[in-house]
Each structure stands twice: as structure tokens, then as C-alpha cells.
Image (cartoon, helix red, strand yellow):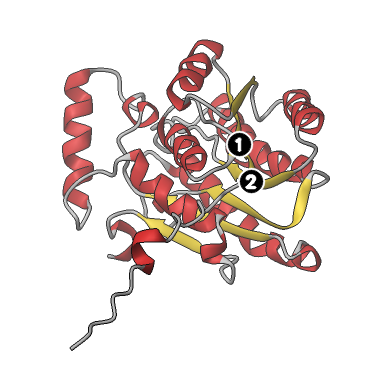
Amino acid sequence: MRFRVDTHFHTKEKDMNKLEGKVAVITGANSGIGLATAQRFVAEGAYVYITGRRQSELDAAVQKIGKNVTAVQGDVSNLADLDRLYATVQQRHGHIDIVFANAGVGEFVPLGEISEAHFDKTFDINVKGMLFTVQKALPLLRDGGSIILTASSTANKGTPAFSVYSATNAAIRSFARSWILDLKDRQIRVNAVSPGPTNTPGSDDLVATEEEREQYRKNFAASVPLGRMADPDEIAKAVVFLASDDSSFVTGIELAVDGGLAQI
């Protein structure tokens, strides 16, 4: 008896990377979710432009990413900084395929103690900064491109002393719904990713001491059905999905990557 041996799986070339040849812009990529996503994007074949406010952290991020990356220091709430970012992209690549508008800040401030400065800073970076990050990208963004916005599970859950931050994330969720209509003729997809509690330098900065951080981590982990905080790379993998053709018929959604927190 003769057996047919199919060796196709031995000789098959490795599947093409999900973001092969794509050009991506990632704001707030000097640490945390932004940095983890930049690493994932490059591993999947993309060239990334990253931004952050602190040059030393940006330099360290470039070293960590290793290749196919350009860092442009800037603050997303400063429109001149955004213009400089996109001028750099225009000069070097001439187009963008993916925008991951990820930069954001938050502080615990209870109602009764909210200052105008706290309100202005949070909305300037999280809402104004996100809006103009996307709007100023549009002339360079290819038709059929992907825009991903970082929101948060706090948009859907009440959190003590976090009302201003939570309100900015509700605005971000609304942006995704509206912008898919504004951009429908260009077939540009817009989606929001909503992380739950995630182990990042930004989350650590919410409290002052290591003892408080430990308690904060325990409290958040206890509130999550999966019983722990997320690793930034777990969020990054979801962003790769939204950036790639794997999600070609997905637009306007809020993808909760929160261990089930917003579902209960």
C-alpha cells in the first residue's frame, strides 16, 4: 500500500506579518500601553512614529523597540507639536496607515476638590489632544486606514474621585461613533480600545507611595473578574487586531480589554 505524504506544511513560507509595510503613528508611546503596542507593531512588520512628552523616556523607548521607529518629542495638547510630528512623517514616508491615539492622563480628585487646572489639563490632553491627533493625521492617512482610540473602562463604570478622567473617556467613546460616519466615504475604520486596570507607570503615578500602590493594585485586582491587572502587552495584542485586516469589518466599536470589569 502506498501512502500519499503531503509536505506542504513543511515548505510553506511563514505567513506574512499582520502589519507588513504599514506606517503607524502612536501617541503616548514612551511607556506602558503605547510602548508595548509600538513593539508589537514593529514585530508585525510596521514602521512606527512614537511621541511622548519626555525626551529621555522616548530615547529609552526607541532603544527598547530597536528598529523601524522614529521618535518625535511633543505634547498632543500642543497643536504645533502635532504639526511637527506629521511634518516628520510627511518628509520620511509621505503617508500613514494606522493612527493609535493613545496619549492620556488621569488623577484622582474627588468632586468638591476639582480645580480648573485639573479639568483643563485632563480634557486638553485626553479630548482636545486626541481630536487633533486624528484630525491632523487625515491628510496623510490612506483611504481604508485604521484609527484606534484609547478609552477606558472608567467610561462605563463609576469610580470614586475619577469623574473628570472618566468623562474624557466617555467623550472618546463618542468620537469613535461619530467619526465612522464622517470618514465612511474613505472607508477609514475608527475603533476604541478600553483597557481595565493595567500595570503601567501611568497607573503607578496615580498614588504617591509604594505602600499606596500595593493597596491600589490589590483593590483593582479584586474588582476584576479575572482577579488581576492587565499587562500592557495584553492590550497591545488587541490594538494589533484593530489595526490589521483581521478586523476589516469592525468599526465604531469599543473593545473592552478589562478582564470583565465593565461587564459586571
Instruction: Give the residue type at disc 2.
Output: Lys
Residue 175: where, in percent of width, then height?
64, 55
Instruction: Give the image location of residue 102, x and y in percent.
Output: 54, 40
Q: Is residue 77 left or right of residue 116?
A: right
Q: Residue at left 31%, top 43%?
A: 197
Above or below for 16 versus 92: below
Look at the image and tell me in which quarter the C terminus lies. Answer: bottom left
Looking at the image, tell me whether mark 2 or mark 1 is earlier in sequence order.
2
Q: Quadrant of residue 128?
A: top right
The image quadrant that residue 92 belongs to is top right
Q: Is residue 25 left or right of residue 246?
A: right
User: Which residue bears the numbered disc 2?
Assistant: 22
Query: In the rendered image, which quarter is residue 72 located in?
Result: top right
The numbered mark at residue 105 is none
The quadrant of the picture occupied by the N terminus is bottom left
Residue occupying the far bottom of the picture: 1
Question: Considering depth in this image, is 232 or 88 the residue closer to the camera?
Answer: 88
Q: Residue at x 50, y 51 (%)?
A: 17
Q: Is residue 80 among what the camera can see?
A: yes
The answer to which of 47 and 87 lies nearer the viewer is 47
Q: Position of residue 182 (x, y in %)?
A: 77, 62
Residue displayed at 44% across by 54% down: 14
Which numbered circle lies on residue 47?
1
Q: Is residue 154 visible?
A: no
Find numbered disc 2 in the image and state the secondary structure of the residue it sits on: loop
Answer with left or right where residue 193 lies relative to residue 217: right
- Identified at 19% across, 41% down, the residue is 219
Three-letter amino acid code of the residue under disc 1:
Tyr
Estimate the spatial distance between the alpha carbons at disc 2 and disc 1, rounded to whole Å: 6 Å
- Numbered disc 1: secondary structure: strand
C-beta proximity under 8 Å, tags 2 and 1? yes
